[in-house]
Amino acid sequence: MNETKEVIEELRAALERNGIVLPSLGLDALFLAAASPRSLIELGRITVDTARKLAAVLPEEGGRS
């Protein structure tokens, strides 16, 4: 679970560098109830403005920039 928390913080920092804040970003607590627990990251719901910002910083062809 420590790795998941590290990834969440990396993602939060990367988004913030691009002016994007996902208020609900965090660990999905329901994953603990699964028969085969695996870490899931909750991104949450976002505003249209945030969705536009997110789309603007993602690479067009799915590759890493």
Image (spheres, grey):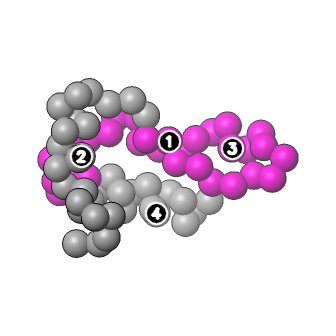
Residue corresponding to mark 4: 6
| C-beta proximity under 8 Å, tags 1 and 3 | no
Q: CA distance from mark 2 to mark 1?
A: 16 Å
Q: Which residue is mark 1?
A: 42
Residue at mark 3? 31
Q: Are marks 1 and 4 in contact (CB under 8 Å)?
A: no
Q: Residue furthest right?
A: 35
Q: Residues within 10 Å of mark 2 (few under 14, many from 20)?
A: some
Q: Nearer the viewer, residue 6 or 11?
A: 11
Q: Which residue is mark 2?
A: 54
The image shows residue 21, relative to residue 1, as above or below, that is: above
Q: Which residue sits at x=54%, y=59%?
A: 4
Location of residue 8 in the rendering, given as x and y in whole percent from the top left corner: 43, 55
Please, what is the three-letter code of the amino acid marked with disc 1? Glu
| Res 21 → quadrant | top left
Numbered disc total = 4
x, y percent for residue 17: 17, 57
Q: Earlier in the sequence, mark 2 or mark 1?
A: 1
Q: Is residue 37 magenta?
A: yes
Q: CA distance from mark 3 to mark 2?
A: 25 Å
Give the residue type that dot 2 points to. Leu
For the residue carrying disc 1, how many other residues have a C-alpha within 10 Å: few (<14), some (14-19), or many (20+)? some
For label 3, the crowd category at 10 Å Cα-Cα, with few meaning under 14, some 14 to 19 and many 20 or more, is: some
Magenta residues span 15-43
Amino acid type indicated by mark 4: Glu
Secondary structure beneath label 2: helix
Q: Quadrant of residue 13?
A: bottom left
Q: Could you tell me residue 45's position as x and y percent?
A: 39, 29
Q: Secondary structure at mark 1?
A: strand
Q: Residues within 10 Å of mark 4 (few under 14, many from 20)?
A: few
